[in-house]
Image (spheres, rainbow, N blue to C red):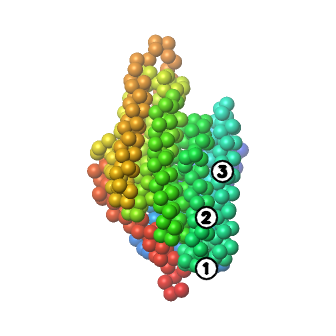
Amino acid sequence: MTHGPVLLVVAPLATAVICSVTSMAAKRATRYVLLTGLLVHAGLLVLVAVDATRTAGLIYLVGGWAAPAGIVLVVDRFAALFLVLLAIGEVALTLYTIGKQTVDRSGFAVLLALLATALSGVIVAGDLFNMFVFIELASVASIGLIALKRRDTGAASGFVYLVYASISGALFLIAVVVLYSSTGVLTIAEIGAVVHTMPPEAIAICSVCFIVSFGVKVGLVPLHFWQAPAYHAAGSTAAAFLSGVAMKVYLYAMVRLLWSGLDAVARVPAIAVVLTVAGLVNIVFGHLVALGERDLKRLLAYSSVAHVGYILLGLGSSAGMVAALMHIVMHSLMKTGLFFSCRPIIAHSGSSRISRLAGTARAQPVAFAAFVVAALAIVGIPPTGGFASKWFVSIAAYADYGVLPVLVVAVGTVISLLYYVRVSIAALAEAPPLRRRVPSTGRAGATALVVIASIAAATLILGPAMTRLEPTLRRAADSVVDRARYIDLVRGPTR
């Protein structure tokens, strides 16, 4: 697809514009515009990803201007993996929301389409300026989705995230200033080509700025305080997309800049130690706080904090990129499945408080069963995909840092098992006789349950099938670790 990379940004942006018009003139039509637009965009994401995987990669010169003077959109095998994750998230979200009144809520369709635009732009951006613009657009759309339900805490949670996002953006811009003053370019590939001329101190400053900047987005301790209130205030559908998809795109951007641009781990080895220590802190802190949490959605948020730690632990290991990508893929599925499956459970109980979930296992058996399966996977019980990804992360970390990271992973696994068992026991308890019952949601509910069950099944199947997925992930990892390959793709092998 010659114009594939730019269409990934233009298509959802057009959907957002059309939704903004139909929401004023024909509100019910907005639902079909959004769902159609997301499905078309998901198809484009897959087509571009397949095309990039079959070739050395795709580049698109906006206006025909080559780098570093022009804007370049880049899709290599590493980017292709995240395009597929985004496509899966959009398809699952589309099928899950068919018939839901959420789609008709003013602003939801526009914000969701804008978020899809921004996430696509972050993945294909070949320069720091456009990546920053798309990150900020994603922040604005995320704030809107967090505050959209107009709950008591929605506006406050959105404002808190706005403050954190501003800090993240400021740190990103500091790194950009240092890089531009040192290299004179903003294209990631061009920075990678001349990064050897930069002093190690400048590389370290930029690396730390990027790690902290994206650490705000993904919930790096102690920059995580916005996450639990935000996921609690947002609807379960929005929270699933923010945690299952958006967070992974921010991790993609961090890895792209640290490896393809700065070659940070090779030139400043302490960066690997920073990533590893940060990962261990996230694992311990996230699981311990989740263990004491009394709200289901906040518990899932702190679980995400912990699982960012597993990903960082893989990234901090010399041979852990494949393991980190495995856990990114699995966490995307597992956390999406958990948020989707807890929605009917919470709707039935009328509250996300764990103490009020009694009777929901019997009332929502499919959703509860899917929740249990996804929970087993995210805990890391064999033979689920979560066990496989944790196993690979542990092996990679053990090779570099010995037994301590393995012990932390094991302890985190036990703690997470305890709090998911607590949730399951609460849901299996007999409901009080006067507990309000929520009516069946009909066909829309059936469609949503099929999506929930499919995601749960995928977390089981991918465990034994991880050996088949590993070659694809290894090719994606090689494309980002091999900096010269990325530079040649953008610049051309003869330059």
| Residue type at tag 1 | Ala
Which residue corresponds to the image point at 56% horizontal and 58% vertical from the top-left? 211
**Element at label 1:** loop
Which residue corresponds to the image point at 66% horizontal and 48% vertical from the top-left? 164
Asked if labels 3 and 1 touch by Cβ distance under 8 angstroms, the answer is: no
Which residue corresponds to the image point at 51% horizontal and 28% vertical from the top-left? 294
Residue 99, position as x, y percentages in the image: 53, 38
Count of picture labels: 3
Q: Which residue is denoted by mark 3 in the rendering?
A: 165
| Residue type at tag 3 | Ala
Which residue corresponds to the image point at 62% horizontal and 47% vertical from the top-left? 142
Q: On residue 281, which mark appears?
A: none
Q: Which residue is denoted by mark 1 in the rendering?
A: 66
Query: Closer to the N terminus: mark 1 or mark 3?
Result: 1
Asked if labels 2 and 3 touch by Cβ distance under 8 angstroms, the answer is: no
Residue 127, position as x, y percentages in the image: 61, 69
Q: Which residue is denoted by mark 2 in the rendering?
A: 205
Dot in front, 3 or 2 = 2
Q: CA distance from mark 3 to mark 2?
A: 20 Å
